[in-house]
Image (cartoon, grey):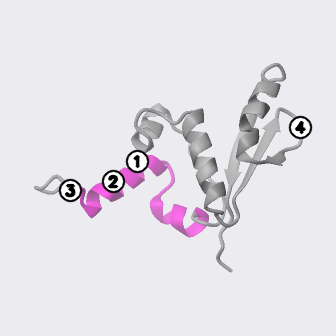
Amino acid sequence: MSALGVATAADSRRELCGLLDPIHPDVFFAEYWEVKPLFIKGGLEKLNRLTPGGFGITHFREAVCKAEMNQVRGFRLWAQRLKERNVYIRSEQIDSMIASGLGDGPIVFAGVTRSGHP
């Protein structure tokens, strides 16, 4: 941090390295950024650095609604029950999917975007 308490470029680089670890930021930007998804293992400490206090279903709903409302190019929301095909849904279907899936095992929700770059 600078003397004024402002994050410096070095601080930002260290934070990015910590979040992406074990992937080097250069590899992340060259191979994954706006190209393909990447799963990075990590505990709650990584998540809490990104979203202090956690990221719950309310935060997820808000993010999905915002993406739909802003018509984010390439955004799709899908739900999938264990060993079933995924289905594309809209944000207003999240609660009914959760309610219908409680007895049938976990449901995975994912928001997918595809780069708009040619």
Residue for badge 4: 84
Of badges 4 and 2, the one in the foreground is 4
**Mark 4 or mark 2: whose residue is earlier in sequence:** 2
- 67 falls in the magenta region: no
Amino acid type at mark 4: Glu
Q: Say if mark 1 contacts mark 2, CB within 8 Å.
A: yes
Location of residue 54 with respect to 29 vertically, above or below: above
- CA distance for labels 4 and 1: 35 Å
Report the side of 104 relative to 50 (left or right): right
Label 3 packing within 10 angstroms: few (<14), some (14-19), many (20+):
few
- Closer mark to the observer between disc 1 and disc 3: 3
Pointer 2: what residue?
14
The residue located at (66%, 73%) in the rendering is 116
Front residue (pair 91, 85): 91
Q: Residues within 10 Å of mark 2 (few under 14, many from 20)?
A: few
Residue 42 vs 36, above or below: the answer is above
Q: Secondary structure at mark 4?
A: loop
Mark linked to residue 45: none
